[in-house]
Image (cartoon, rainbow, N blue to C red):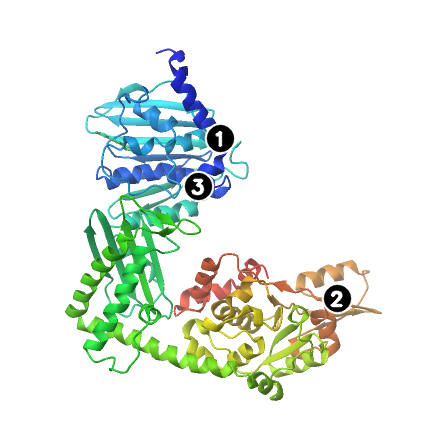
Amino acid sequence: MDEKKHYDDGDIQVLEGLEAVRKRPGMYIGTTSEKGLHHLVWEIVDNAIDEALAGYCDDIEVIIGKGNTITVKDDGRGMPTGINAKTGLSTVETIFTVLHAGGKFGGGGYKVSGGLHGVGASVVNALSSWLEVTIYREGKIYYQKFQNGGKPADELKEIGKCEENRTGTTVTFKADPEIFTETTIYNYDTLAKRLQELAFLNKGIRILLRDEREEEKKEEFLYNGGIIEYVKMLNKNKTPIHAEVIYFEGTEDGIELEVAMQYNDSYNANVYSFTNNINTYEGGTHEDGVKRALTRIINNYARTNKILKDNDEALTGEDVREGLTMIISCKHPNPQFEGQTKTKLGNAEVRKIADDVFSEGFERFLMENPNEAKIIIDKATTAARARLAAKKARELTRRKTALDSINTLGKLADCTSKDASISEIFIVEGDSAGGSAKSARIPKTQAILPLRGKILNVEKARLDRALSNEEIRTMITAFGTGIGDEFDLEKLRYHKIVIMTDADVDGSHIRILLLTLFYRFFRPIVEQGYVYAAQPPLYKVVYGKNIKYVLTDEELAEYRASLPPNAKPIVNRFKGLGEMDAIDLRETTMHNEHRVLKRITVEDAMEADKVFTDLMGEDVLPRKEFIEKNAVFVENLDI
Ligand code: 0RA
C-alpha cells in the first residue's frame, strides 16, 4: 500500500487524538516527571499481564536497553493482525493509535490489570520518539514501526516466518525527551520493585527484568505461591509466631478474593490491599470486609472458648491486628476507585464477598488448628491489656500537675516564654552536659532536659511499656502534646526540639533512639520539621587572640594549613559536651548566632519506617550493618 492510505479522514482524527495526548500528557499519565516516565512501562507491561491473566501467557521480559529504551516481550497469543472493521486499520495499528482502543479489542474476558489511569498503548506511542511492535502468530512474524509521537512509518507487514507454535508480542519504545524533559532514564529499582509485586500478585507468571545499559543486571520473579510468598518476604526480618502463612481464596459473581496472613511478634500491623494489581493504599470495601470479619471471628472464638469472660470488653480491630502481616488481593471485572488518590475500592458488593470468603476460611482454620488459634488469640488479648494499661499511663502524663512536678524535680529547666514559636528544648545526654547547658542557655527561650537513664528502644516496645519508661514520660510531659490517639500538635510547647549529644558513637546511638521514639510516637513533630540535631564542635583552637571552633578533623587540618608555617596553635579536643564550659557551649552549639542546627526531615515515611525497623528490630545483622553506616544515615536524613 502507498503512503496516502494513512492520511484519509479517519487517520487525521487519529493523529489529532495523539496530538492531544502530546499537548496535555499530564491528563493521560498524571505527570511527565520520572514517575510518568515509568508509567509508560506499566501501560505496556499491563497489556502483557492481561494476556497472562486470560491464561495465554506465562513469560514476560522487560529489558532496559542501552539508550534507555524499553522492551516488553510476552509469549501470549500475539496481538490480532487482521483489519478492524470500525477503523479500517489493522487491529495492531488501532491499538497503538486510537485513544482508549485497548479494551475493545480484548476479545472477551475482563481486564483485571490496567494502571490507575489505564490509558493504553496509544498514549505510550504518542509520547514516544519511536515505537516498534513485533508479533509472532501462525508461523509468521509481523512488524510495524511508529515515529515522531505515534505516526505509523508504514502499515503492519509480514516480515518473515517463525516456528508454527511460536506466539507472542514484543513492544519496544523510546520515551520522547521533548515530553519527558526532567529525565528519560529509568530507575532499575523502581522497575524491579513493581515487577516483583506483579509477580507476587499473579502467581505462576515469570517476569524477567534485564538492564543492558552498563553492567548487565537481571532478576527473575516467579512465585508459584503468589501472595503467600509475598507475606513470607514481608516477614523475613521478623519473627513469625506461627509456622505457616494462612491463605484463603474464593470467587463470587466473577469477583475473586485472595488473602494471605501471618502474625509476627512485633506490635505493628502491615495490611496491604490490592485490586486488579493496583495497591489500594486508601483501603476500601475489600479491606473493610476482611478486617471486619477478622475482628468478629476472633471475638467469637475468644468468647466461645471462655478466653474472654462475660464482662470483658470486646477486642478491638487494632488488638486483633497487632503484629499482623496481611495481603488482600481482589480481582474485579469492574472496579470503582474512589478517594483522594483514587486508591480506595468503592464497590459495595465486595464488602460482603470479602467478609464471606475470609470468615468461612478463617473460622475453619481456627477450628482445625487449635494451637495456632491459641497463639493468635493470646496475641490479641495481650494487645488489649496493653491498650488498657497505656490508657491509664497516658492519663498520668496528662495531669495538669505533671509539668509542675518535672520542673520541681529538677528534671526540666523550662524556659520562661510561653510562646512555642520562639521556644526551644535541648535534650541533652547526661547530667554533667545538662549542667553546662543549663548555665549556657538563654532562660527566656531555651529549656534544658537532661536525660539520665537509658532511653528505651521503642521499636521493641508497645506504647504501654514506652510509657512506663520515666525518661519518655518526662519528655511527653515536657512537649505537652500527649501521645497516641490524644496527640495534639497544637499543644506542642517548643517549635525547636534539639537533640544535643556527643559527637561519638554513643552519642549517635542515643540520637537514633530518640529519632525512633519521635518517629513512632510523635511523627507529626518530625514531619513538621520541629526536630533538630545540634552540632557540637570537636576542637577548640586558640591561636594568639583568635579562638576557632571546628567540627571535624578535616576542618582542623584545613585551618592549620591556613596558618603561617611556624604557627603553633593550642588545640583542645572536646571529649564530650560535659567537658565544655558554659561559654564554649553557648558560643558554639546553643546561641543562635553561631550554632549550626541540622533539621531532621522525614522525606518518605514508609522508607524511614523500614530503616528504623532494620536498625532497631530484633535482627542483629541489619542493625550492625546499619550502625556501621550510621554516619551516612544521619547525612541522608538531611539533618
Ligand atoms: C486481544 C486478542 C488477542 C490477543 C491480544 C488481545 C493480545 C494483546 C496483547 C498486548 C500485549 N500482548 C498481547 N497479547 C495478546 C488474540 C485473539 C485471538 O488469538 O483470537
Name the residue beneath numbered marker 2: 593
CB atoms at circles 3 and 2 under 8 Å apart?
no
Of callouts 3 and 1, the N-terminal one: 1
Which residue is pictured at 49% across the width and 41% down the height? Answer: 31
Q: Amino acid at mark 3?
A: His
Could you say where residue 330 lies in the image, as x and y percent from the top left? 28, 51
Classify residue 139 by image quadrant: top left
Residue type indicated by callout 1:
Arg
Q: Amino acid at mark 2?
A: Glu
Q: Residues within 10 Å of mark 2 (few under 14, many from 20)?
A: few
Read off the residue under disc 1.
22
Residue at x-position 20% and y-position 51%: 251
Left/right of residue 460 with respect to residue 506 in the rendered view: left
Q: Is residue 144 left or right of residue 539?
A: left
* Image position of 515 (left or right of 385): right
Tell us which disc is closer to us: 3 or 1. 1
**Disc 3 versus disc 1: distance between alpha carbons?**
17 Å
Q: Which residue is mark 3?
A: 38
The quarter of the picture where the C terminus appears is bottom right
Mark 3 or mark 2: whose residue is earlier in sequence: 3
Task: Kindly report the distance in space between the C-alpha atoms of the residues bearing marks 1 and 2.
Answer: 52 Å
Q: Mark 3 packing: few (<14 Cα in 10 Å), some, or many (20+)?
A: many
Where on the image, by quarter, is ligand 1? top left
* Local crowd size for mark 1, using a 10 Å CA cut-off: few (<14), some (14–19), many (≥20): many
Label placed on residue 552 = none
Q: Are marks 1 and 2 in contact (CB under 8 Å)?
A: no
Dot 1: element: helix
- Which quadrant of the view contains residue 617? bottom left
Q: Mark 1: is the Cβ under 8 angstroms from ligand 1?
A: no
* Residue 51 appears in the figure: yes
